[in-house]
Structure formats: structure tokens, C-alpha cells
């Protein structure tokens, strides 16, 4: 492997080096990046979007060698900032055909930077199973035939043993990714998951089983003292300002909100046809104390001051297992969505999905789709190999999940998500397939929070729930979030709020920080993301500048999709998710939301064309994307 130095004088926050790995020709190349590249893109999926846009031909088949999959970190990943745990996997999504990215926490990102690299991009396809071994500034492509077929837990253990180092961090795919399941994911630390966009299948298509990293170096930091002082101030003030949020979150993680979100109408219920408060009265059984009572110890990602994770153990009965604690999305996807209140079964199902490398949101949605098909006579016991499907039947849900994970029998029909399954089954099953552009909808109902709905359709990765938190509308744009329900449903004038919320999230994801604690940085008086960036890099930036980076990242990801031929009309929410027809009972009774109107407000504010999806030429030039503007507007 050729090694080259960082291009600019060292300040901090990034190593300035990335790896490009050509699996077809067994070649690894190091590349140095300028500081200005980081000032423009911040790292993470911002960096990923620019590099993939430049390196990938339009209309590349997602499971062909020409697709590129990247593991990216951000400026704050692995630093003493209390937020920097994340890495983001990027690539063209085989599930949607659009831009794809997915974030995970854990320790992989920090380890990669300590090993002297900010990102790794994989090109081509290995002729045999392979993994990349990155060790303190060096990288080698290694034979993975001994771990091919193993689950992610076994894979991590074997690689640690093989390299005789328990501190190695591994990101790998399970058998689902190897078998090219379009809802497969990438797992690190045996249960931190880059779940969405089906990028596990892209790794599988490249015969790339895992990336294993070990780094003993220090990430360059401009002012470590300042970063430590900011961290302390952040923790003290955030605890003071949001005491309940902090303590509740650190105790339960997102599992603490499961019952409340089901009762309020946020959690979709019975494959988006039911009402939590009516159809799923025992949501409490899969929530907060009823989840953490299985916890044996806490888990936190790198440097996190409010660790939300944990290990759980079911000691007896049919669902015995030791696993990572399921978070809200999983508890809802295998709980309210299926009317299943058996928490022990959900813990085991979560473990199966993690081990095999399946996204739990998409897998739960695929099971919900199958149950509705079955109960409506579209499929029968013969199709499901004797498994009788019913709402709330934990055993049949578990069986079907196993079949999807192994791509066996009817599981093979569901293993590529509900859009593909409906196209295979036909017979009108499309109406039970709840997805946007192929990606199954997350566990937040747009009828309760329309900004989730707008994020599902306007983000470059359709069905993205982590961009749609309505709460940011208050803190970021000054556009007050009116109280539920009347004015909340009027999108007029909310384009600025939706856009700033999206830009803020692009900053968060590009910097490599976790959204949960970083929400608190938006509160007046608490150190901002700009403060942390300045301490890490020695820059002198302000939030407005970072939000401009977020705006640029939004345009770059959007440009990727426009170049692929996607238009806003291709991203439509299923009728049942927006209240067509409106619910007849519960807190969302009578509600229909016209999400298109919300999306139009965003497009107007962002200066994107609502027919073509193109950001205006003027805007792209202002953001330094003249070359991309030429591609989209002149070619
Ligand atoms: Fe990880 Fe949870 Fe902390 Fe985020 S809040 S960094 S997901 S432990």
C-alpha cells in the first residue's frame, strides 16, 4: 500500500487521509485530502456524497461491482466531544436505487481515525470472500473464507482471536448481507447497526464480509484542553436544562418512550391500519421498565455521557437469549406494528436480526405485510410453509423472521423488502406494502408529526426518520411549533423550519456525532456544535457557517438522486400513512395530512424545483457546486 502524508499542516479533527480499496484488483491506495475539503463537507456522509458523486457513473446497478460503499467518519468522531461516536456507511441503495446512507455508533469510527484514516471507500468486487484489515496506518485485503457464513457476533469474535487483539473494532455483514437481502445491514460491536438503505447487500455483492480496524494513535486535536472544558460545560448545562430528558434517556434509551409513543398515535399499529390506544392496549409490556428489567449491564458508544444502550438476558422460557437491548424502532416494528406485546420474543427477534444482519424496521414491516396478506387470503399456509400468521402471535412472527434471516422458503420472498415482495406476490398485495420508494416506513406516524412525513419523502434516503424531529422547529428557526392539533397541520411558512432542521441534521451526521445528545447543543447557552468543531480543528466557525455546509450536503445528496433520474413525484407516501381514509378512532381520529404541501414549502424555501427536484443553479453556485449545477442544468 502506498502511503502519503496529510496534505496540509496538521491542525486537528481529522487525519486528512482516506483509503480507496479496489477489491477487483486487490489494490489499496491512500489519498490525502485538503483541509478545505473538510471545511466544505465536514466528513461523514457529506464527504461520502461528494466522493461518490464524482466517482460513480449515473445509473450504476447497486449490486454491481461499479457501486461504491464507503465507511466515513466526521470531524468530531472519536474526539473528546461528548457526541462523537458515529460513522456513516454510504453507497447507492439497492433497496431504493437512490442515494443511501446509514449511521451507526459504537467504537468503529473512533478506532478507524486512531488508525490514521477518516474514511474507506470500496470499489469493484473481490473474486472470493474478503475482509479489510486496517492496523495503525496500514491496510491489507485478507481472505474471509473462514468467516463467510458466520453471523456478526461470530465474525467479530473470530477476527479478534485471529489477530490476537480484543480491542479490534469490526463492522461486518451477516448471512443476510451475504445472500444479498435488500433489507440487510452492517453491524458493529455485536449490535450497533447501520440499518437502513440495504447497504449490507452492497458489501455482500462485493464479497466483502467485514472491515476490522485497530488504531493506537491519537486523533489530532487543535485544543484538547478546550475540548475537555467544553465537554464538562455541555454535560453540566445539559443536565441542568433538560434534567428529565437526560436521566430518563440514560436510564431507558429510546425504549423508554415506547408506550407513550404507542398511546399518542406516533407508533404505527397493525401495519398502519390500527390505533395504538385501541388495538394495542398493552404497549406498556414492551416499554421502559419492562425492557430494562432484563438488562445485565449498560452500554454506551465512544465517549457518550448519556449511554442509552445495554445488554439484556432472557434466562428461561422459549425466548432464551443474551442480546443488545432493543431500541424504540425495533420495539415498535415488532410490537405495535404487529400487535405483539411479548417483550421476550422481541428481545430474541432483535438478536436474530442483529446476528444475521437485518434492518429491524424493514424486517418488522415485511412481517406485518405478510400477516395482512395472509389474513386477506392473498397468501396461504402453503405459501408460508405451514406457518399460520396472525396479529400478535409471537411464535409465528419469530418463525417468519428466522425464515427471512436465512432467506428460506417464504422468507426469501420477504427478504428484499415489501415492494419486491408485493411485486412477486401480486394479487393486489401492493396495498399492504407500506414503503416510500422501496424503503419501509419508520415507526413515526406523519399524521401525528407531519415533519416526519415530509422527511420521509424529501430526504435523499427515502423513509429517513432521523431528519424529521418536529422539536427542532422551535429551536433552530424561530418558527414556533404550534400546539397539537389545529395549527400544527398548517405547513404555511414552515419551509424555513423544515429546511433548517434538515441542514442541522446534515451537520450532525457529517460531523459524526450522535443525534440524541447533539439535540441538546441546539439549546441556547449550551456549547454549540460550532464550539466543539473549533476546539477540535482550530477553526473559527459559527453555526450559520456549519448550517451552510448542511445546506450544501443536502444539495449534493439531492444531486445524486436527480442525476439518477428521480423526481419528487417518485417519493410518495402510502395513503394509509397520511390518513386516506382518516382513522376512525383514537388520538388521530379524522386526521388526514397533505404531506405534499409540507414538501412544497421546503422546496420553495430551499430554492429547489418541485417538478424536477433540481436545486437552482444560482443556489448551487452560491454553495460552491458550479460543476454539479452544470451537470444538472446544462447537460
Ligand atoms: Fe450511542 Fe446512545 Fe450515546 Fe447515542 S446516546 S452515542 S446511540 S449510547
Image (cartoon, helix red, strand yellow):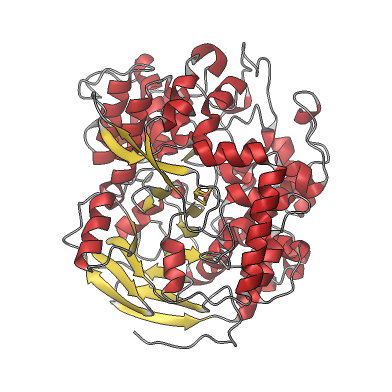
Using the rendered view, name the quadrant where residue 169 is placed: bottom left
The answer to which of 176 and 565 lies nearer the viewer is 176
In x, y percent, where is residue 284? Answer: 49, 20
In which image quadrant can residue 589 be found?
top right
23 left or right of 55? left
Q: Tell me if 139 is positioned left or right of 551 in this view.
A: left
Q: Residue drawn at (51%, 38%), measured in percent from left and top?
A: 251
The residue drawn where x is 36% and y is 53% is 189
Total labels: the figure holds: 0
Q: Is residue 42 above or below residue 250?
A: below
Instruction: Work out whether 427 lies above or below 256.
Output: above
The location of residue 197, given as percent across then percent down, is 46, 49
Is residue 422 visible to us here?
A: no
Residue 182's x, y, as percent?
Answer: 37, 46
Question: Can you say whether 158 is above or below 5 in the image?
Answer: above
The N terminus appears in which quarter of the rendering?
A: bottom left
Looking at this view, name the residue that lies furthest to the left: 146
Q: Is residue 584 left or right of residue 477?
A: left
State the residue in front, 560 or 32.
Answer: 32
Where is 548 relative to 272, above or below? below
The answer to whether residue 396 is seen in the rendering is: yes
Percent across and percent down for residue 532 are 66, 65
Give the position of the C terminus as an image quadrant. bottom right
Amino acid at each position: 500500500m502506498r502511503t502519503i502524508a496529510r496534505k496540509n499542516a496538521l491542525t486537528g479533527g481529522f487525519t486528512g487521509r482516506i483509503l480507496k480499496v479496489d477489491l477487483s484488483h486487490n489494490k489499496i491506495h491512500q489519498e490525502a485530502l485538503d483541509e478545505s475539503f473538510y471545511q466544505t463537507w465536514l466528513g461523514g456522509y457529506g464527504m461520502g456524497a461528494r466522493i461518490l458523486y464524482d466517482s460513480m457513473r449515473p445509473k450504476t446497478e447497486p449490486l454491481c461491482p461499479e457501486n461504491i460503499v464507503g465507511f466515513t467518519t466526521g470531524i468530531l468522531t472519536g474526539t473528546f466531544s461528548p457526541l462523537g461516536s458515529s460513522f456513516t456507511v454510504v453507497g447507492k441503495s439497492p433497496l431504493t436505487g437512490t442515494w443511501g446512507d446509514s449511521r451507526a455508533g459504537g467504537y468503529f469510527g473512533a478506532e478507524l481515525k486512531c488508525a490514521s484514516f477518516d474514511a474507506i471507500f470500496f470499489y469493484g468486487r473481490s473474486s472470493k470472500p474478503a475482509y479489510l484489515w486496517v492496523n495503525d496506518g496500514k491496510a491489507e485485503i485478507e481472505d474471509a473464507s473462514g468467516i463467510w457464513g458466520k453471523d456478526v457476533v461470530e465474525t467479530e469474535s473470530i477476527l479478534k482471536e485471529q489477530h490476537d487483539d480484543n480491542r479490534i473494532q469490526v463492522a461486518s455483514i451477516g448471512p443476510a448481507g451475504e445472500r444479498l437481502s435488500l433489507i440487510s445491514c452492517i453491524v458493529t460491536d455485536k449490535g450497533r447497526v447501520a440499518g437502513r438503505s440495504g447497504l449490507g447487500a452492497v458489501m455482500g455483492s462485493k464479497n466483502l464480509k467485514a472491515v476490522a480496524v485497530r488504531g493506537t494513535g491519537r486523533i489530532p486535536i487543535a485544543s484538547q484542553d478546550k475540548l475537555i472544558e467544553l465537554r464538562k460545560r455541555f454535560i453540566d448545562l445539559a443536565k441542568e436544562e433538560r434534567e428529565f430528558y437526560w436521566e430518563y434517556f440514560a436510564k431507558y434509551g429510546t425504549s423508554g418512550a415506547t408506550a407513550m409513543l404507542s398511546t399518542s398515535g406516533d407508533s404505527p399499529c397493525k401495519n398502519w391500519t390500527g390505533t395504538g390506544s385501541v388495538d394495542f392496549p398493552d404497549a406498556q409490556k414492551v416499554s421502559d421498565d419492562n425492557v430494562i428489567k432484563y438488562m445485565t449491564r449498560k452500554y454506551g458508544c465512544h465517549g457518550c455521557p448519556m449511554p442509552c444502550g445495554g445488554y439484556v438476558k432472557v434466562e428461561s422460557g422459549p425466548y432464551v437469549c443474551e442480546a443488545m437491548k432493543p431500541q424504540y424502532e425495533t420495539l415498535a416494528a415488532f410490537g405495535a406494528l404487529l400487535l405483539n406485546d411479548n417483550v421476550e420474543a422481541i428481545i430474541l427477534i432483535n438478536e436474530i436480526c442483529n446476528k444475521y444482519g437485518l434492518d429491524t424496521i424493514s424486517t418488522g414491516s415485511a412481517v406485518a405485510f405478510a400477516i395482512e396478506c395472509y389474513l386477506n387470503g392473498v397468501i396461504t399456509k402453503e405459501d408460508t410453509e405451514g406457518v399460520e400468521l396472525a396479529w400478535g402471535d409471537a411464535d409465528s412472527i419469530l418463525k417468519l423472521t428466522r425464515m427471512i434471516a436465512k432467506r428460506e422458503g417464504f422468507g426469501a420472498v420477504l427478504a428484499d423488502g415489501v415492494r419486491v415482495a408485493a411485486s412477486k406476490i401480486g394479487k393486489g398485495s401492493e396495498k399492504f406494502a407500506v414503503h416510500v420508494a422501496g424503503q419501509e416506513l419508520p415507526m413515526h406516524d406523519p399524521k401525528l408529526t407531519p415533519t416526519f412525513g415530509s422527511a420521509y419523502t424529501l430526504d435523499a434516503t427515502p423513509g429517513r426518520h432521523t431528519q424529521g424531529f418536529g422539536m427542532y422547529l422551535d429551536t433552530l428557526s424561530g418558527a414556533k411549533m404550534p400546539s397539537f392539533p389545529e395549527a400544527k397541520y398548517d405547513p404555511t411558512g414552515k419551509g424555513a423550519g423544515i429546511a433548517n432542521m434538515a441542514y442541522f441534521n446534515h451537520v450532525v451526521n457529517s460531523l459524526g456525532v450522535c443525534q440524541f445528545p447533539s439535540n441538546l447543543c441546539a439549546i441556547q447557552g449550551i456549547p454549540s456544535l460550532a464550539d466543539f468543531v473549533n476546539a477540535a480543528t482550530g477553526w473559527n466557525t459559527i453555526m450559520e457557517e456549519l448550517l451552510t455546509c448542511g445546506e450544501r450536503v443536502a444539495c449534493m445528496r439531492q444531486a445524486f438522486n436527480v442525476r439518477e433520474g428521480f423526481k419528487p413525484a417518485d417519493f410518495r407516501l402510502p395513503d394509509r400513512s397520511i390518513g386516506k381514509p382518516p382513522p376512525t378512532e383514537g388520538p388521530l381520529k379524522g386526521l388526514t395530512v397533505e404531506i405534499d404541501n409540507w414538501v412544497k414549502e421546503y422546496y420553495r424555501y430551499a430554492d429547489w424545483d418541485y417538478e424536477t427536484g433540481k436545486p437552482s443553479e444560482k443556489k448551487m453556485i452560491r454553495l460552491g457546486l458550479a460543476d454539479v449545477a452544470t451537470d444538472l442544468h446544462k447537460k
